[in-house]
């Protein structure tokens, strides 16, 4: 279709090497300035130069200043996720796992200032949550390593004419995500002051909740488009469908809290790992 070809050309221009390098440099500088500005606000607030809510951890502890650059870097990772989406379901879901792991690390920096050293660890919910997150990030990091290792072992299929058409259709879907993502970002910035933000989970709800919901829709569209090219390959359809389930589990983690949220994230990556392992084994049989 001409529409897919036009969208693919626009996608290639939007995500050209020049533009990606510019966005990367911009992200680095914004993260640096964001960290410095956040740190200065905390120092001025703690020394009485300005008077802000002292009960809000992000405005009282210098450690919390790391939260801002991580947030900016995460937006850049979302930009890369849209760029990788047309490549393959495997590459896309791997980037999703990396994003959710960075979100978890950001949460750790948010929770560290709430740590109570002088209390019984087992009786303090904030302390327990920090322990859960620290253990969880190690498990998630290891599972992502295993996922990446299996991904490298899979023999890539040849890019035939049909596959090239499918890639163009995926670029069209990804191109649609760019203005929608920009709208979600601006909406979250405009409305963030009107929200009653009392925890990490409320902050996530501003952007990532909606983005992963949108990503599920995009994945389903790509899955439906793939039927035209992979309808005879059962393993490919099962893999792609399984990865959509991973995205749904990640999206569900934003609606949960505490240990439940962490378990949903780990379940998502573990499920994706098993799906990829089974697909890798079946792929060897199908091409032999």
Image (cartoon, rainbow, N blue to C red):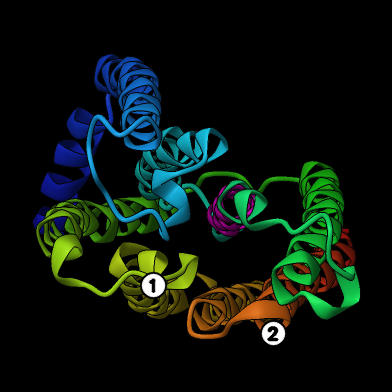
Q: Is residue 163 above or below residue 206?
A: above
Q: Badge 1, how many Cα within 10 Å: few under 14, some, many 20+?
A: some
Q: Is any part of residue 232 visible from this angle? A: no
Q: Quadrant of residue 137?
A: bottom right
The C terminus, quarter of image = bottom right
The main secondary structure of the magenta stretch is helix
Q: Magenta includes 107?
A: yes
Q: Point out the stretch of residues depicted in magenta.
A: 91-108
The residue under the point 63% across, 57% down is: 114
Please indicate whether residue 267 sits to the left or right of residue 186 in the image: right
Mark 1: secondary structure: helix
Q: Is residue 10 visible?
A: yes
Q: x, y (%) of residue 85?
A: 43, 52
Taking depth in this image into account, of 137 and 113 the one nearest to the observer is: 113
Quarter of the image for the N terminus: give it.
Answer: bottom left
Taking the spot 12% from the left edge, 62% from the top edge, the residue there is 187
150 or 69: nearer the eye? 69
Left or right, 41 with respect to 186, comes to right
* Sequence-first disc among 1 and 2: 1
Q: Relative to residue 116, is residue 279 depicted above or below?
A: below
Residue occupied by mark 1: 202
Q: Is residue 281 left or right of residue 178?
A: right
Q: Tell me the residue that label 2 is attached to.
A: 260
């Amino acid at each position: 279709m001409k529409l897919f070809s036009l969208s693919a050309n626009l996608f290639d221009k939007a995500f050209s090497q020049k533009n990606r390098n510019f966005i990367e440099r911009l992200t680095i500088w914004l993260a640096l300035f964001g960290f410095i500005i956040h740190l200065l606000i905390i120092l001025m607030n703690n020394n009485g130069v300005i008077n802000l809510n002292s009960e809000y951890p992000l405005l009282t502890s210098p450690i919390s200043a790391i939260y801002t650059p991580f947030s900016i870097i995460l937006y850049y990772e979302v930009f890369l996720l849209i760029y990788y989406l047309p490549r393959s379901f495997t590459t896309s879901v791997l980037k999703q796992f990396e994003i959710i792991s960075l979100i978890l690390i950001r949460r750790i920096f948010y929770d560290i200032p709430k740590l109570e050293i002088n209390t019984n660890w087992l009786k303090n919910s904030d302390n327990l949550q920090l322990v859960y997150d620290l253990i969880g990030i190690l498990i998630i990091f290891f599972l992502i390593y295993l996922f990446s290792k299996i991904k490298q072992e899979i023999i890539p299929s040849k890019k035939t004419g049909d596959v090239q058409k499918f890639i163009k259709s995926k670029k069209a879907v990804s191109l649609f995500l760019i203005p929608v993502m920009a709208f979600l970002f601006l909406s979250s910035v405009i409305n963030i002051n009107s929200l009653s933000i009392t925890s990490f989970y409320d902050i996530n709800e501003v952007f990532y909740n909606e983005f992963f919901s949108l990503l599920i829709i995009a994945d389903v569209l790509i899955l439906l488009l793939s039927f035209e090219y992979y309808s005879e390959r059962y393993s490919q359809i099962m893999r792609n469908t399984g990865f959509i389930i991973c995205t749904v589990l990640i999206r569900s983690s934003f609606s949960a809290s505490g240990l439940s949220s962490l378990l949903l994230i780990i379940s998502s990556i573990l499920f994706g790992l098993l799906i990829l392992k089974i697909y890798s084994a079946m792929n060897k049989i199908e091409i032999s």
